[in-house]
Amino acid sequence: MSVNIEDFEAEDAESLDELTNAERVLAFLAANDEEAWRPSAIAEETGIDRDSVGPTLSRLQERGLVRHKSPYWAITDDRDRVREAIRDEEGPVEILADLVSESLESILSSAR
């Protein structure tokens, strides 16, 4: 995967550290939690190789972080599980935590 040269010049090495495929998929589904998505659309929206999206979704499903009704995938509605997974992840989880937190806050406020 590449990075825009302007971002390369402007950011420090730590900021350029990429999210894992699982983090990117989870963040995308959390930010778009009002819909379920086909793997091809997730690949297109996240920039992840189409052949990597399926296995990534399967791993996330095994951890209870996504739900599946063929051919669609969506983030779990168990928000506590998502929060716990974010705390347990290693790597650049601050970005993921911010994306998921924003999404969860909007869900919780609209449910009240």
Image (cartoon, helix red, strand yellow):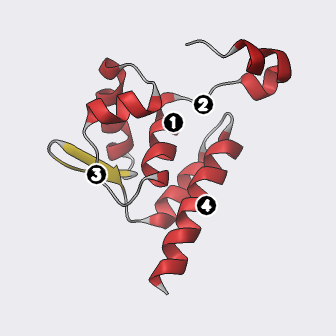
The residue furthest front is 6
Mark 1 and mark 3 residues within 8 Å of each other at the beta carbon: no
Query: Of callouts 4 and 3, which one flags the residue occurring earlier in the amino acid sequence?
Result: 3
Tag 1's secondary structure?
Answer: helix
Query: Of callouts 1 and 4, which one flags the residue occurring earlier in the amino acid sequence?
Result: 1
Q: Which image quarter: residue 20?
A: top right
The local crowd at label 3, few if under 14, some if 14 to 19, many if 20 or more residues have their Cα within 10 Å, is: some
What residue did someone put label 4 on? 102
Q: Residue 19 carries which label?
A: 2
Query: Residue 15 location in percent, x, y?
Result: 77, 28
Q: Which mark is residue 36?
A: 3
Work out whether 37 lies above or below 14. below
Tag 4's secondary structure?
Answer: helix
Q: Along the line of sight, which residue is nearer the eye, 15 or 80? A: 15
State the residue at coordinates (51%, 36%): 24
Residue 34 visible in the picture = yes
Query: Of callouts 3 and 2, which one flags the residue occurring earlier in the amino acid sequence?
Result: 2
